[in-house]
Amino acid sequence: MPCRRAHDPVRLFTAADVPIWYQSVGRAIFLGDVVDPSNRDTMSVGFARYAPGESNDWVVSYDEVLIVTEGAFIQLIQGAALTHTPQ
């Protein structure tokens, strides 16, 4: 794991820090970023709220942080399902 550089601040984000929530058209999926290209070129950090049973196809082309706080997030990689839940 890389060491944090001295000038990189440690920051706490909550869903209240999301400036704009985006809703997927006609679906109960809400997304909001707290770190995006305006803060960091190659990384995104945000919050997502999916209603039970909702899903979306998503190909990530940058570093992404996902923290599951409730429920489960199922990730499909080359046909294999990985289920992520809060610890």
Image (cartoon, grey):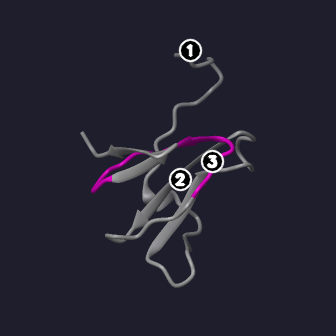
Question: Are the two marked residues, 1 and 2, in contact with CB atoms closer than 8 angstroms?
Answer: no
Q: Which residue is mark 1?
A: 3
**Residue pointed to by mark 3:** 60
User: Callout 2, which amino acid?
Assistant: Gly
**Residue at x-position 40% and y-position 67%:** 50
Question: Label 2, on which residue?
Answer: 46
Q: Sequence order check: which comes first, mark 1 or mark 2?
A: 1
Which segment is the magenta one? 58-72
Residues at circles 2 and 3 in contact by the CB criterion of under 8 Å = no
Residue nearest the viewer, comparing 27 with 69:
27
Identified by mark 1, the residue type is: Cys
Label 3: how many residues lie within 10 Å, few (<14), some (14-19) or many (20+)? few
How far apart are the two marked residues, 2 and 3, measured between alpha carbons? 13 Å
User: x, y percentage for residue 8?
Assistant: 62, 27
Answer above or below: position of 81 versus 27.
Answer: above
Distance from the alpha carbon under mark 1 to that under mark 2: 22 Å
Sequence-wise first label, 2 or 3: 2
Can you give x and y, in whole percent of width and height, for residue 75 in the image? 44, 48
Quadrant in which the C terminus appears: top left
Q: Is residue 70 above or below residue 84?
A: below
- The residue furthest bottom is 26
Real-space CA distance between mark 3 and mark 1, rounded to the nearest whole angstrom: 24 Å
Q: Position of residue 82 (x, y in %)?
A: 37, 43
Assess whether residue 42 is covered by the magenta stretch.
no
Count neighbours of disc 2 (C-alpha within 10 A) and say few if under 14, some if 14 to 19, many if 20 or more: many
Label 1 CA crowd tier, 10 Å (few <14, some 14–19, many 20+) = few
